[in-house]
Image: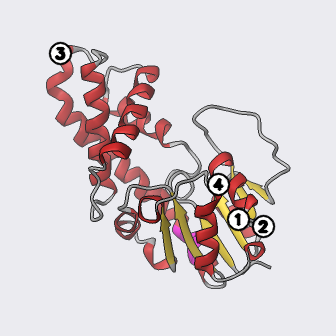
Amino acid sequence: MPQAFLFDYGGTLDTSARHWAGVLFEGYVHVGVPVSEPHFRDAYVYAERKLAREMPVLPHDDFHALLVKKLHAEFEFLVSEQLLPVAHHAEVPHYVARIADYLDDFARRQTSQSAQVLETLSSRYRLILVSNFYGNLHAVVERYGLDRYFETIVESAVVGVRKPDPAIWQLGVDAAGCAAADCVAVGDSYDKDILPARAVGCQTVWFKGEEWKPTERDESLPTHLITSLPQLLQCYPV
């Protein structure tokens, strides 16, 4: 039996294994932004790179604040590339506010469901969070009430190493204080979570869901494959 669980955050605990690009575009559709999905995806990539390069995210930013910054960067791209009709430029602040509210509510509902699984696991196992994030992950999980389940947060912007580098998973193992073989890494990304965590010797649970680009994977490689988080409790009964 394992001694610790190392959880990815984004996609694993806050979207039920849906890639955030798909969830964000759902927000665009919900508020009626006249942008195609291919153009949105270009804006999504631009915003991710801008956030990584310019680091405007502050440690106290909760997820709603982060969403607002992401969305402003996305609309900056859409406007500059003339992908948003001129008649809608004045609506950008309203679009940003409404989409941020919609997605914050979505994440709150998803993390509330995840909390039920974390509550059960935390009664027996040590839980560590291992995530690529912007330096504000503690504020994000605190806002959603998940911080009390995790003994340590290993965050890329803080520790200076990012997935898919196996070193970040090794830091999670070190934080757990046990052998890698006694740690279960849980994540929605086959390339960023499963492969590198397996490389350091962890048991792995692939939370298979909606990826950025559908790709054939060797499903026999993870220790377990799940399609909903509660299934984790069937793999590792408490």
User: Which range is magenta?
Assistant: 115-119
Q: Is residue 96 left or right of residue 113?
A: left
Residue nearer the viewer, 159 or 37: 159
> Callout 1: helix, strand or loop?
helix
**Label 4 to label 3: alpha-carbon separation:** 42 Å
**Label 1 to label 3: alpha-carbon separation:** 48 Å
**Label 4 to label 2: alpha-carbon separation:** 18 Å
Q: Which residue is mark 2?
A: 235
**Label 4 to label 1: alpha-carbon separation:** 16 Å
> Callout 3: helix, strand or loop?
helix
What residue appears at the point 68 percent right and 47 percent down from the top-left corner? 190
What residue appears at the point 59 percent right and 71 percent down from the top-left corner? 172
**Label 2 to label 3: alpha-carbon separation:** 53 Å
Using the rendered image of the protein, determine whether residue 120 is visible from the camera's viewpoint.
Answer: no
Q: Which residue is mark 3?
A: 87
Mark whose residue sits in front, 4 or 3: 4
Q: Amino acid at mark 1?
A: Leu
Instruction: Find residue 71 and name its label.
Output: none
**Count of residue discs:** 4
Q: Which residue is mark 1?
A: 232
Q: Amino acid at mark 3?
A: Ala
Label pair 2/1, CB-CB below 8 angstroms: yes
Q: Residues within 10 Å of mark 4 (few under 14, many from 20)?
A: many
Q: Which residue is mark 4?
A: 193
* As drawn, 34 above or below 167: above
**Label 2 to label 1: alpha-carbon separation:** 5 Å
Using the rendered image of the protein, determine whether residue 138 is visible from the camera's viewpoint.
Answer: yes
What residue appears at the point 34 percent right and 39 percent down from the top-left corner? 50
Picture coordinates of residue 47 (x, y %)?
A: 36, 36
